[in-house]
Image: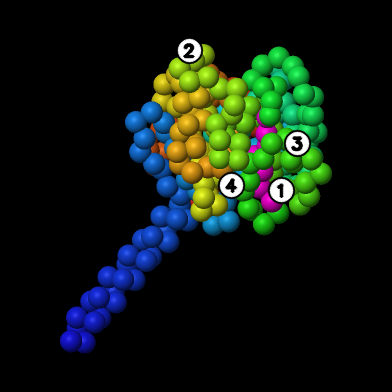
Amino acid sequence: MSKLWLLLSALTFLISTSSLLTEKQGRAIDEPKFISYEMDPTQQELKFYWKDKHGANYQNFQRLKANLEKESKELVFAMNGGMYNQDRSPQGLYIENGQLKSPLDTVQSGYGNFYLQPNGVFYLTDDNKPAVSTSQAFINRQNIRYATQSGPMLVIDGEVHPKFIKGSQNIHIRNGVGILPNGNILFAISRSKVNFFDFATFFKQKGCENALYLDGFVSRVYLPSKSVKQLDGSFGVIIAETKSKTN
């Protein structure tokens, strides 16, 4: 009886340890139309990047990866983090490590997807709690470690953006971010061209109360756990998960 009890105890320990490791490492989710990744930033290291210590734009995951390797860091996951201006500077709000790099854009009309109101902000608080909100709701928010503004919102209070049209032929590769019912972050990029309605519906069906569009045809993702390593491209803000390298 004692040997059986010890065996069951060992199995229970292994299962619980495996579950803990999976949670801390994030979870790549198999989807027919999307590459998606769920993570908990209170357990994993998520940061936003724009320029290196010399003031040069990272621009793509290859350059970020090379810089991180010099610091004995491993790139676990990366995705472009919002729209940008011609000089690759962030369009709208950008906060990095508690420092305001670009102010919130409160203009209510303009050209392009960014100004399809309401647009929104994806952010992490000082204690690494993630959130997505409309830009209007974000105004005067305090204790923010990282934030990026983009648009339009995909899901607002549990509903698909009212201006999206089912069956629309406005299709592109698209990437976005939402907050799951368990408080984790859900990142996703379409495997092929998709319209806004279908992309937003994906986040809604996953249970996201709020989700934000990040960008379109320029979008890339780095997720080696799913054998996806899109290291090319040239964009502004990068959202990335890293971990310390082990020898």
Circle 3 packing at 10 Å, graded few (<14), some (14-19), many (20+), is some
Residue type at mark 3: give it: Gln
- Expressed as whole percent of the image width and height from the top left, the position of residue 203 reads 49, 36
Kindly identify the residue that appears in the image at 49 percent across and 15 percent down. Answer: 168
CA gap, disc 3 and disc 4: 25 Å
Circle 1 packing at 10 Å, graded few (<14), some (14-19), many (20+), is many
Q: Secondary structure at mark 2?
A: loop
The answer to the question of whether label 3 and label 2 lie on touching residues, with beta carbons closer than 8 A, is no
Residue identified by numbered label 2? 169
Residue identified by numbered label 1? 145
From the viewer's perspective, is the residue at label 2 or at label 4 nearer?
2
Taking depth in this image into account, of 183 and 18 the one nearest to the observer is 183
Residue identified by numbered label 4? 46
Q: Earlier in the sequence, mark 3 or mark 1?
A: 3
**Quarter holding the C terminus?**
bottom left
CA gap, disc 2 and disc 1: 38 Å
Please determine whether, in this image, residue 33 is positioned above or below residue 165. below
Work out which residue is located at the far bottom of the displayed protein and give it: 2
Residue 98 highlighted magenta (yes or no): no
Residue identified by numbered label 3? 136
Kindly identify the residue that appears in the image at 58 percent across and 56 percent down. Answer: 42
- The part of the image, by quadrant, that contains residue 160 is top right
- Expressed as whole percent of the image width and height from the top left, the position of residue 199 reads 49, 28
Q: Earlier in the sequence, mark 2 or mark 1?
A: 1
Residue type at mark 4: give it: Leu
Residue 121 highlighted magenta (yes or no): yes
Q: Earlier in the sequence, mark 3 or mark 4?
A: 4
